[in-house]
Amino acid sequence: MTDDQGYGDIGAHGSPYVKTPAMDKLHDQSVCLVNFHVDPCCAPTRSALLTGQYSSRTGVWHTIGGRSLLGTDNVTMAEVFRDAGYKTAIFGKWHLGENYPFRPMDRGFEESLIHGGGAVGANPDYASNDYYDDTYIHNGVREQYSGYCNTVWFTEAMKYIKENRDNPFFCYVSTNVPHAPLLVDSAYSEPYKSMVSERLANYYGMIAKVDEDLGIFIHELDNLDLADNTILIFMTDNGPCPWFGGIIIDENGFVEEGYSCDMRGGKIWGYENAHRVPCFIRWPDGDIGGGTDISKLTAHIDLLPSLIDWCGLETPSQGDFDGISLRNLIQGNEDNWPDRTLFVHNQRVDFTVKYKEYQVLTEQWRLLNRDTLELYDILDDQGQTKNLVAEYPDVVQKLTAQYEDWWEHISTNFDQFNPIIVGNEKEDPSMLYSHDAHRPKGEPAYWVVDVEKEGEYDIQPYFRPKETGKTLKGSRISKGFLSIGDEVIEKEVQQGAETINFKIKLSSGQTKVSAWFQRDGKDLRSYSLEVEKIGNLPM
């Protein structure tokens, strides 16, 4: 799964710019779902893909702010495969939590090599990472790797597959490329600079690099004699980004630069190009392939139930999937596929807001609510240029009622948190990043934590990333503040001090934690917060 690559950014889909020979070859060898949909941004798509449920049901409806933490009640694809005796591994982007119990190693992946947060160089990532010779998180421990990030993911994934070639394996390669920052060797971007702006040239260069690595990866599967009996799925996590990615659009969402197969919009922004993405599935031994296009309405939530079906796995007891198996659609009769309705919405807030930026999808219609209701006949108007909301009030009424039912169905836990557990031996100390702090307007950001064991804790806020070695010394910071529940603790920073620590007693249970500094009379948010259990309370 690539990151922020649009449906139109593949040669086989008609791009006049980017060259993708490996993706094109895979396209010609696969069943291609050409009406396949995901969430309009990355973490929600990942949660839905791994659980077979709508992302908001899992507690993931944002990419930051504590709303990208995958709820522990949800069984993941990795857990399903692990419990069936498969070896399980992830390489690349996780983006569903940095701390216990949300890390991939806590959610069914026996082997994990990932970067932090939603992008290389983001707040939870290693501070000096810049795509080259970076430090990543290998099974919970930071280790340095040589080479370009995307090549590291594919190279390490292939090493893992070679080591486990005699076992059934589930390998999730989730690259951060071509997500911004748009960094790639000029040899890949230079061929595009005469055709498009430098920004898009860099973006296309990153896709060219992904394509190169993917081609090598698939070739190695052939060399290992694994290709025929391996289900290989290629997809992307959302449409291209209009702000710092591979599409430039006008104020109405129409393309000014880039290629979108005539689709309107882009990542987060909305419309078809936000959530319709490529999905290629190849499995020679399962008679899946041949360059066949399937136009029925499908989605990321369908892949887990499909893999359970294809691989003969046991459906988990919590397997109340929103998706349905693609087996009969792909290997049976397309005419028997249900006339279904799917839903997409863009929340990106702390607490969800009903009617906010939603889209209702059927085979024929797209009902959208951005600032006002819009209705498009997607079979006749793929570019979504003719708003038919006034001409078809009965369709609007029907699809609106379906949205109301859907919201009622998924909104049972919208007022709850997915807390980070502290004081557990699986992660102690815990480093909490501002990336995962909730951010209410006009109030200090806070983390929601679940103190597993009451006791004495050492809590240290950081003004800069810990790994930089930059301390409070010389920073002009005069005070530090720690808020636990309703209690606020204030400490003066001693002259020449490099750190400030709060040693306090915490009771077990869920609470809110905030930390901030004061410099020259102004409050400054803590970059991160380290929480370590240092003793038990007396009985």
Image (cartoon, helix red, strand yellow):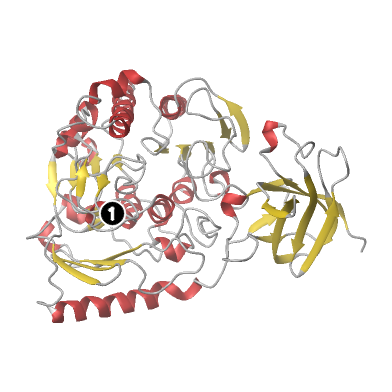
Foreground of the two, 311 or 301: 301
Q: Secondary structure at mark 1?
A: helix
Q: Where 300 falls versus 158 (above or below)? A: below
- Is residue 288 visible to the viewer in this orientation of the structure? no
Quarter of the figure with the N terminus: top left
Foreground of the two, 1 or 444: 444
Taking the spot 47% from the left edge, 59% from the top edge, the residue there is 60
Please tell me how crowded label 1 is: few (under 14), some (14-19), or many (20+) other residues with Cα within 10 Å.
many
Residue 122 image position (x, y, % from top left): 53, 41
Q: Where 179 falls versus 508 (above or below)? A: above
Residue position marked by numbered label 1 in the rendering: 275
Q: Where 328 falls versus 284 (above or below)? A: below
Residue 452 image position (x, y, % from top left): 73, 59
What is the residue that sits farthest to the top in this orientation? Answer: 187
- Is residue 189 visible to the viewer in this orientation of the structure? yes
Taking the spot 24% from the left edge, 26% from the top edge, the residue there is 192
Q: Where 317 falls versus 46 (above or below)? A: below
Q: Amino acid at mark 1?
A: His
Residue 141 lies left or right of residue 155; in this view the side is right
Residue 366 image position (x, y, % from top left): 19, 65
Taking the spot 49% from the left edge, 36% from the top edge, the residue there is 120
Residue 382 picture quarter: bottom left
Residue 462 lies left or right of residue 374; in this view the side is right
